[in-house]
């Protein structure tokens, strides 16, 4: 009987240890982040949010922090421009949505002078 009790206590301790380990928070800032390709996704960037500007022209990633809530608005403003801090090139923001409708699900692309997508935004916070 004594042995059984000890085994039970040991099992209980082991179980609580396992729970503690799995409850530990995951590494901050690590993980996979996906490109924001719609206005809705870009507008999730608020003041203080970090996002990455990926430039295909020079194959660089620039991590930025939104200075204000309006920054996301600028990033999806049709006809606006985005600068790459690395190669200093600029891209024009193109909004493609259903014709005649101000849809929140408008697709946002950043194109170069040739009309090819050359940059994109990756939000780094959920
Ligand atoms: Zn660049």
Image (tube, rainbow, N blue to C red):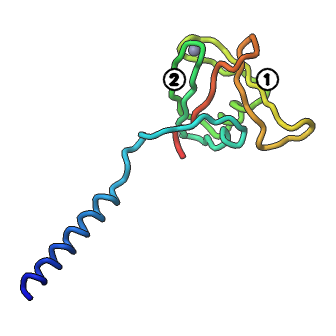
Could you tell me which residue is drawn at 72 percent across and 27 percent down? 109
Which label was assigned to residue 79? 1
For the N terminus, which image quadrant?
A: bottom left
Describe the element under mark 2 as helix, strand or loop: strand
Residue 17 x %, y %: 23, 64
Q: Nearer the viewer, residue 47 or 72?
A: 72
The x and y percentages for residue 106 are 78, 38
Task: In the rendered structure, find residue 61 and report the number of the disc placed on it.
Answer: 2
Q: Is residue 110 above or below residue 87?
A: below
Label 1 vs label 2, nearer the camera: 2
66 up-or-down from 7: above or below: above
Which quarter of the frame holds ligand 1?
top right
Classify 10 Å Cα crowding around label 1: few (below 14), some (14-19), many (20 and above). Answer: some
Mark before the other along the chain sequence, 1 or 2: 2
Residue at 33% in and 59% down: 22
Q: Residue at x 53, y 36 (%)?
A: 50
Q: Residues within 10 Å of mark 2 (few under 14, many from 20)?
A: some
How many discs mark residues in the rendered view?
2
Q: Quadrant of residue 45?
A: top right
Which residue is found at the position 86% from the left and 38% from the top? 98
- Name the quadrant containing residue 66: top right
Secondary structure type for disc 1:
loop
Q: Picture coordinates of residue 46 (x, y %)?
A: 61, 42
């Amino acid at each position: 009987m004594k042995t059984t009790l000890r085994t039970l206590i040991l099992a209980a301790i082991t179980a609580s240890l396992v729970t503690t380990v799995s409850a530990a928070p995951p590494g901050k800032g690590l993980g996979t982040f996906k490109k924001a390709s719609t206005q809705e996704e870009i507008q999730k960037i608020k003041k203080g949010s970090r996002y990455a500007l990926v430039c295909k022209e020079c194959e660089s990633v620039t991590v930025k922090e939104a200075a204000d809530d309006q920054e996301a608005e600028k990033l999806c403003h049709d006809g606006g421009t985005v600068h790459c801090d690395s190669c200093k090139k600029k891209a024009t923001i193109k909004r493609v949505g259903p014709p005649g409708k101000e849809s929140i699900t408008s697709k946002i692309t950043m194109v170069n002078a040739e009309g090819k997508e050359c940059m994109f935004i990756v939000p780094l916070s959920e």
